[in-house]
Amino acid sequence: MSGKSSRKRISVKSDSPASSYIKELPDLIITGEKFVDENGNNFIDAGESCNIIFVVQNIGKGTAKDVKVKTSLKEQTVSGLGFEKVISLGDIPANGTKQVGIPITGELGLENGFAEFQVDVIEQRGFDAYPLFMKLESRKFSTPKVIVADAAFSTEDGGMIKLNYPIVLEIIVQNVGKGDAKDVTTEFRFPNANCFPLSEWSSFDLGRMEPGASKKLEFTFTANRRYTQNKIPVLVDITESYGRYSRDTTLSVSLEQRLIARNEVVISGQETAAPTIAIASLSADVDKNIPMVRKKHPYRYALIIGNEDYSRYQRGIATESNVDFARTDAKMFREYAMKTLGVEESNCFLLTDATAGEMLQKLDLVSKLAAKTPGKAEIIFFYAGHGLPDENSREPYLIPVDVSGTNLSAAVPLNEVYRKFSEAEAKRVTVFLDACFSGGGREAGLLAARGVKVKPKENMITGSMVVFTASTGEQSALPYKEMEHGMFTYYLLKKLQDTKGDVSYGDLADYITQKVSLESLKVNQKEQDPKVNVSVNVQNEWESWTFH
């Protein structure tokens, strides 16, 4: 026997992968974790699709085998969540990365609470990453509600609705609910034959609409002369992803209807919206829902003038000399005069962008009409536009669109207006002046022509006359841009709307003075204090006068 001992190699077999020979070790980590949701509010909202996104990185020297991502919810968390429980990533080599997105869906039955997720990255042989814990807040379902919030028909020339001519329908689609609306579409369709779209598109994809969001759409169409109905209905079909939180609306326009402004109410039965959402509109609130009073006054006359576009006539006056919204002021006051104040249409005279000749002719006409029935006639005079005093005499003038602020010889003296109306021996004369006479009109007005504001002289008024003026002394008559009216006119119309015209002159004066003085400071950061001038003859009775 030899002195050397013999040694044997013994191999051990095992089914355990960890016991296999490993030359280099993997090392998995989770980095760049974040939560991404559709509306970006960092909640899991019911009805919303979200993702937990992160990167799995192998910072070791060996390959990670058959890597899987397993997601679970800790006990006693909210129900109503759907998510991917297992995602396979395959092998991740040394220094390799894999982008991971775990889709999460908030079901409609989801309640308010917190969802505590645990994300485990599992490697086949047990070389796992440290788990990721993420606590997310969930929020129950808030229903959207997509409606036609406002609509208006018009024609290209501002005239009447006629067969075989283009008709324009503008609408505002708005989500007035408390939840997001997704995949919103709007389609215009015709219930009746012989109607045709003229727009390139009849269907519009509005996408996602958050609470309060609105979209303005325009659709042009016509009906040919084979059309036999009195009205043309247009169906506005609105859909959204849930299929139950939108409302279709049928809008109708009458043939031969005259469209003066966007004041035709075409929506009725509007349901109450969420209280925190202001309903979008194509026009100011005073431009629609104008009160209709049946009683007419056969001897009541109205002359209404809105001078806005001075730049077209005045090459020497810059475009900022235009009086913003003066035409709208006049057109809407005409609607109130006929519908709310009882003026017959044949007795209601409207001038927009009036020249000196036009203004003087209509002043003369209305005065003569009133003089035919002395003691019975009533005159209502409304003017929105530029006013300017003579620099030397301080006499105030109404400025026609074709008269320069540097040459008042062709302007209309305000005193002449008062004189004509007084000589008509009318029972009552009511004057509304949304103009200032200091030279500082809306957006500075004709001030540039004078170089300095001039305090106008107060005219002595006679007869049975009450004059409501938009501002005092050297102040300007300012616009209310949000409402697209003069500040004075807006609150004049607002009071007539709220009271259906059943308001005393005293209450009207108090309301306009209080509202305009306060809101002008808030909106324009400038003082504007309306004033009432009254003739001596009626100073003890005018406050009790009414339009009814």
Image (cartoon, grey):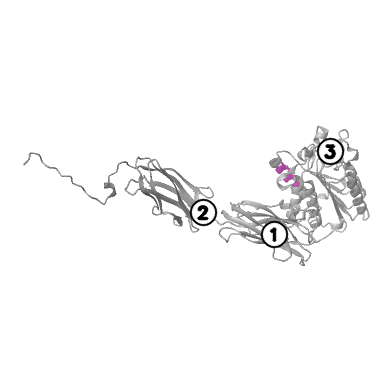
In the figure, residue 531 lies in which quadrant?
A: top right
Query: Where residue 137 sits in the image (x, y, percent)?
Result: 47, 50
Q: Which residues are magenta?
A: 512-520
- Residue 462 shows up from this direction: no
First along the sequence among labels 1 and 2 = 2
Q: Nearer the viewer, residue 211 or 533?
A: 211
Question: Alpha carbon of mark 1 to alpha carbon of mark 2: how far?
Answer: 32 Å
Q: Amino acid at mark 1?
A: Ile
Which disc, if any, is residue 146?
none
Label 2 is placed on what type of residue?
Glu
Residue corresponding to mark 2:
48
> Image quadrant of residue 399?
top right
Q: Position of residue 240 (x, y in %)?
A: 58, 58
Residue that label 3 marks? 315
Q: Is residue 313 left or right of residue 27?
A: right
- Residue highlighted by disc 1: 267
Q: Earlier in the sequence, mark 2 or mark 3?
A: 2
Q: Is residue 515 magenta?
A: yes
Type of secondary structure dominating the magenta stretch: helix
Residue 412 place in picture, x, y as percent: 89, 42
194 up-or-down from 459: above or below: below
